[in-house]
Image (cartoon, rainbow, N blue to C red):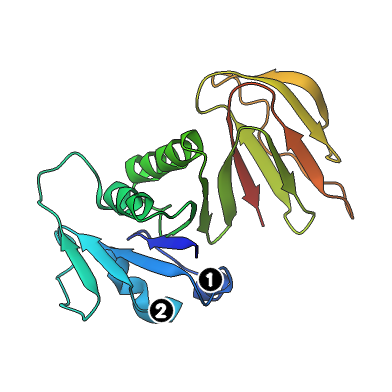
C-alpha cells in the first residue's frame, strides 16, 4: 500500500526540501490550516480533515471529514487514526514541527503511537527528520548531526557505532541528555541499536 503523508499547519520554510520527500503515489491528508501548504508542496489532498477553526473549509472536490471543535483528538491525531483504519502502515508528517511546542510534542507522541502498533512514522521539517528507534536505525553522513532522546522512559542496551561519540550497551534516560548532538563519521553511516525501551532519533542536516 502507498504511504500516507499527513500535512499539518506548522510552518514549512523550505518547500523544495519538503517536495523532495514526496512520492508520486503518496496518499496525502491535509489537516485544517495545513491546506495553506497545497501550492508550496505542489500537491492536492486525497483527504481533508479538520474542524476548520484555523482555516476556512475550501470545499474542494476531495473527500472531507469535518470534525467538531470540542474533541479529544487533534486534527492530526484524527488523520492518523483514519489512515490506520484504512490500512496504512507507513507515515510521513510534514508541517508538524513549529512555533507551538505543545503540538510538536503531541506529534512526537504520534510517532510513539505508530511505533507501538508496529507502524513506521517520520516527521520531516526544514532542518532534518525524526523517528522512533525501538530496535535499530541508521544515520548516513549526509546528516551533520543526530541526537537520541529518551522520550518514553529509560532505554537500555543502547549502542552507537560509526559516530564521533560511540556508545556500547549504554543507558539513556530523560533526565540526562547524554545523546544530544552526535555526528556520523565522515564517509560512514552511523548505526543505532536499542535492546529495551525506545528513543527519539533526530537527524539534523
The span from disc 1 to disc 2 (Cα, nearest Å) is 9 Å
Q: Quadrant of residue 190?
A: top right
Q: Earlier in the sequence, mark 1 or mark 2?
A: 1
Q: Nearer the viewer, residue 128 or 153?
A: 153
Q: Quadrant of residue 72?
A: top left
Which quarter of the image is occupied by the C terminus?
bottom right
Q: Look at 52% across and 69% down and name the residue there.
A: 18
Q: Look at 74% across and 39% down and name the residue there.
A: 182
Describe residue 193's horizontal placement relative to residue 125 as left or right.
Answer: right
- Compared with 33, 118 (above or below) is above
| x, y percent for residue 142 | 76, 59
Q: Residue furthest right?
A: 187
Say which element carries label 2: loop
Describe residue 19's horizontal placement relative to residue 143 as left or right.
Answer: left
At label 1, counting other C-alpha atoms closer than 10 Å, the crowd grade (few under 14, some 14-19, many 20 or more) is some
Tell me the number on the disc at residue 43. Answer: 2
Numbered disc total: 2
Tell me the number on the disc at residue 22. Answer: 1
- Compared with 122, 105 (above or below) is above
| x, y percent for residue 203 | 65, 49
Q: Nearer the viewer, residue 115 or 151?
A: 115
1 and 2 marks in contact (CB < 8 Å): yes
- Compared with 198, 190 (above or below) is below
| x, y percent for residue 21 | 57, 68
Tell me the number on the disc at residue 175. Answer: none
- Compared with 182, 93 (above or below) is below
At label 2, counting other C-alpha atoms closer than 10 Å, the crowd grade (few under 14, some 14-19, many 20 or more) is some
| x, y percent for residue 134 | 61, 32
Describe residue 58's horizontal placement relative to residue 160 as left or right.
Answer: left
Q: Look at 55% across and 73% down and name the residue there.
A: 23
Amino acid at each position: 500500500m502507498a504511504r500516507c503523508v499527513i500535512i499539518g499547519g506548522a510552518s514549512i520554510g523550505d518547500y523544495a526540501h519538503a517536495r523532495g520527500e514526496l512520492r508520486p503515489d503518496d496518499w496525502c491528508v491535509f489537516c485544517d490550516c495545513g491546506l495553506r501548504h497545497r501550492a508550496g508542496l505542489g500537491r492536492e489532498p486525497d483527504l481533508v480533515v479538520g474542524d476548520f477553526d484555523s482555516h476556512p473549509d475550501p470545499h474542494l472536490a476531495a473527500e472531507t471529514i469535518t470534525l467538531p471543535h470540542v474533541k479529544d483528538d487533534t486534527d492530526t491525531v484524527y488523520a492518523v487514526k483514519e489512515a490506520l483504519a484504512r490500512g496504512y502502515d507507513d507515515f510521513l508528517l510534514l508541517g508538524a514541527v513549529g512555533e507551538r511546542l505543545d503540538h510538536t510534542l503531541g506529534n512526537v507522541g504520534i510517532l510513539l503511537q505508530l511505533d507501538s502498533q508496529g507502524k513506521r512514522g517520520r516527521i520531516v521539517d526544514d532542518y532534518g527528520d525524526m523517528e522512533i528507534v525501538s530496535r535499530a536505525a541508521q544515520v548516513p553522513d549526509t546528516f551533520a548531526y543526530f541526537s537520541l532522546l529518551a522520550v518514553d522512559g529509560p532505554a537500555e542496551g543502547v549502542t552507537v557505532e560509526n559516530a564521533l561519540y560511540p556508545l556500547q550497551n549504554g543507558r539513556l534516560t530523560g533526565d540526562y541528555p547524554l545523546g544530544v548532538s552526535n555526528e556520523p563519521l565522515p564517509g560512514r553511516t552511523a548505526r543505532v541499536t536499542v535492546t529495551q525501551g525506545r528513543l527519539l532519533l533526530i537527524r539534523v542536516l
